[in-house]
Image (tube, rainbow, N blue to C red):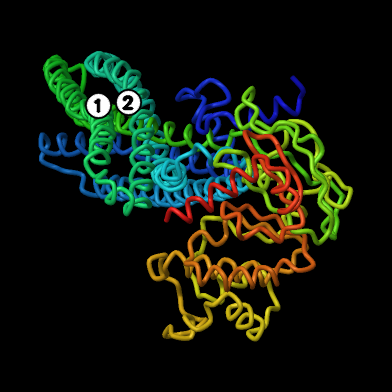
Amino acid sequence: MSPDQERRRGQRHAPGTPTEKPENFRQAWSRLFRYMGRYRAWFVVAVILAVMGTALTLLGPNVLSDITNIIKDGLLTGDIDLEGIAALGFWLAAIYGISAAISLVQGLIMATVAQRTAGSLREDISRKIDRVPLGYFDSAKSGDLMSRVTNDADSLGQDTNRSVSTMIVAITQFLGSLLMMMYTNLTLAGVAVGSTAFGFVLMVLIMSRSQKHFEAQQNHLGAMNGHITETYNSHSIVKSYNGDKRAKREFDQINEDLRHSGFMAMFMAGTMMPLMNFIGNFGYVMVCIVGAMMVLDGSVTIGTIVAFMIYIRLFTNPLQQMSQGLTVMQSVAAASERIFGFLDEPELEDESRKAGRIHAKGHVEFRDVRFSYVPGKEIIHGFSADIKPGQKVAIVGPTGAGKTTMVNLLMRFYEVDSGDILIDGVSVKDLTRENVHEQFCMVLQDSWLFEGSIRENLVYSREGISQERIEEVCKAVGVHHFITTLPEGYDTVIADNDTLSAGQRQQLTIARAMLDTSPMLILDEATSSVDTRTEQIIQQAMDSLARERTSFVIAHRLSTIRNSDLIIVMRNGSVVEQGTHDELLAKGGFYQDLYDSQFEETDMG
């Protein structure tokens, strides 16, 4: 297999399928950190500030221990050192105040880093959509892709800040309080650590088994969005065919999968809090019992016990925070894996080095073109044709013959497996896709209008078109009168597709093509959504539009292409006949069978 064929095979693999082994938790976070790029320095600053703020907090219990001992000694002697208590109290307030200020700055930096990283991911996803092959969207669900752009990116932006900040503070508190306890009293430190070690082991075991449920939750959420988007966009069809129950069953199944994975993820994460609360309370009890015995034999002071009670809280709370932080980090890892999975999809060939550029006259040549959507299942078999500038070429044949595929190859929406397509003697492979697209204006079977004014839809992506020219074209396709009846005329905003009929949308689409000055025209069943009378009006307009342009017309109504300069008859991916209408009828071949069958159907009707 040639390198080009291998590249195309990669371009047409199932969307969402990772090109490498799925990333685990550590790899996902490692890649996310690398992705931060220029924000990594600020990320490190936020980590340092979090450590500093937490370290200052850890000094507080020792100051409280000194205050407690001063009060105890004062109660025994009857002379409490109020100045000493005030000095220590001021110092304690300063410590906590500085710690709070540092934590505030750290939170602001981390929130900025997280949101800008999420924003960069959205931008990269948007650019990626323009770079993946068209074949990706043939099998990808738009709802699942939207879920990656919205839900996954939002989850990453919101939860990264929350999880990372929580984990940094928790780990610093955990290690810092452990060191301070060991510094204060090794015996009590051993009691505190021993009583909480069991809970820490349980936390690790539970979290190691919950990651798969978070990944399943994100995947089922994407499937849910895909199903809802698909059903909503085709709601009229679902209702017409009484498909409500089937759509509901599919929804219920996906919803049940999402409920189960979400329940398991949240249940396993939810066990952390009560477990850590129990372990923390157990640590309090053990320190109180052992500490009371040590106070009685005079080995420690009451101030030390007070400090240890605070250190126990600072030691066990981080375990709770780490369990929560790890839960959120698993959600972030699952979301980032889905996002990076899409960003890793094979892209179209980089064409930045291609210098070839043409302003075509309209000479198009197909040379033994072969193509397959799925490798090994060829659907275009050695197609060849030579179309002269200004000719009107009709491509006809039964459904599935390969008519639209030929247009897609001509526009370079797909790459040919072998053979070549030339425009004015230049291979389309030597031209950028943008330059190829500039040579064509196109009207497809499915009309496309965006939310905006009628004028904006008509002059889409073009400038310098006068109002007179817009009205002239709209009159030619028979839609001008309708537009003038609207409240704002050409400035009326099309809020949704329901404001226009299918025929009116198609008329606007044809008018948009007529406003284009490209040298070649593609019409793919352009009049399939309009009535017979409007079709005649549009047909005259299109004849005018096609004058002095090379035009490619895909048609099922053979009566509309009688005046074509060349009719290409396709069957099962191969060209079986070529010629004018009269020449093909004289041959008495497959074209005549198609032509006669249509008129027989008309007579029977």
Please state the horizontal and vertical placement of residue 600, each as a whole percent of the image.
50, 50
The quarter of the rendered structure image containing the N terminus is top right
Task: In the rendered view, tell whether residue 94 sits above or below residue 197.
Answer: below
Give 210 or 457, whichever is nearer the viewer.
457
**What residue would you read off at disc 2?**
213
Please state the horizontal and vertical placement of residue 249, each as a whole percent of the image.
23, 36
The quarter of the rendered structure image containing the C terminus is bottom left
Task: In the rendered view, tell whether residue 224 sits above or below residue 12.
Answer: below
How far apart are the two marked residues, 1 and 2, measured between alpha carbons? Answer: 6 Å
Name the residue at 58% across, 46% down. 129
Task: In the rendered view, tell whether residue 264 sits above or below residue 388.
Answer: above
**What residue would you read off at disc 1?**
264
Please state the horizontal and vertical placement of residue 291, each as a whole percent of the image.
16, 19
Q: Amino acid at mark 2?
A: His
Name the residue at 66% across, 70% down. 514
Mark 1 surroundings: few (<14), some (14-19) or many (≥20) residues within 10 A: some
Q: Are marks 1 and 2 in contact (CB under 8 Å)?
A: yes
Quarter assignment of residue 258: top left
Task: In the rendered view, tell whether residue 553 sits above or below residue 157.
Answer: below
Residue 73 circle label: none
- Residue 308 seen anywhere in this rendered image of the structure: no
Q: Amino acid at mark 1?
A: Met
Q: Going by the image, does 191 lie left or right of 527?
A: left
Name the residue at 58% across, 56% down. 444
Secondary structure type for disc 2: helix
